Every structure is written in structure tokens, then in C-alpha cells.
Image: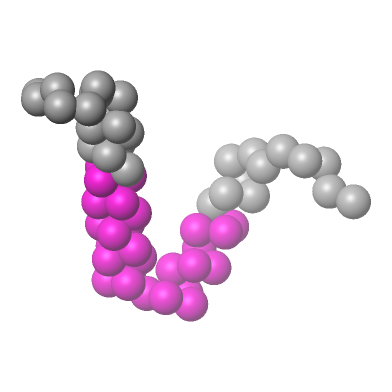
Amino acid sequence: MFGGKLGLPELLIILVIALIIFGPSKIADIGKGLGEGIRNFKSGMREGDQQPGEKK
């Protein structure tokens, strides 16, 4: 149905629609939460790679 790839124009349109719906402050909160989630996930993955009983 769709081409399968999103180019720059499509991403900009999505960003503008998100700004209209949520507003800039809510977008910033979502970005902050997403960044913290990714950081926590990476930290958990690093801890999971260590052997049991091994300390950092």
C-alpha cells in the first residue's frame, strides 16, 4: 500500500502534526522519557552481560 520508506518530507509532516496535537512541552516530556528509557535499557543490558557474582 505504501512505499515502505519515510523520507524527510514525510517525517516533517508527522512532526508538525505531533506538535499541533501534543504541544511543544509535551513533546519535550516524551523525548525526555524516551531518552531515560533507552539509557536504562542499555544499562540493564550491560549488567546482564556480566557473569553472576562479577562486579563492575
Q: Position of residue 27 (x, y in %)?
A: 35, 65
Query: From this viewpoint, which residue is outermost toward the left?
Result: 55
Question: Percent x, y for residue 30?
Answer: 34, 63
The residue range painted magenta reads: 13-40
Image height of 18 relative to 54, above or below: below
Residue at left offset 32%, top offset 72% = 26
Numbered circles on residues, count: 0
Q: Can residue 14 be seen in this view?
A: yes
Q: Nearer the viewer, residue 37 or 31?
A: 37
Image position of 21 with respect to 35: above or below: below
- Quadrant of residue 23 in the image? bottom left
Residue at 82 percent across and 41 percent down: it is 3
Q: Measuring 62% from the left and 46% from the top, which residue is drawn there?
A: 9
| Residue 35 visible in the snapshot | no
* Prevalent SS, magenta region: helix
In the rendered image, residue 20 lying in the magenta stretch gets the answer yes
Q: Is residue 6 left or right of residue 19?
A: right
Q: Is residue 30 left or right of residue 19?
A: left
Q: Is residue 28 above or below residue 3?
A: below
Residue 55's image quarter?
A: top left
Residue at image point 49% right, 67% down: 18
Q: Nearer the viewer, residue 49 or 28?
A: 49
Position of 47 compared to 31: left or right?
Answer: left
Q: Quadrant of residue 49?
A: top left
Q: Quadrant of the C terminus?
A: top left
Residue 56 versus residue 7 in the image, above or below: above
Name the side, left or right, on which 55 lies relative to 12.
left
Image x and y of residue 53, in percent: 15, 27
| Residue 28 is a magenta residue | yes
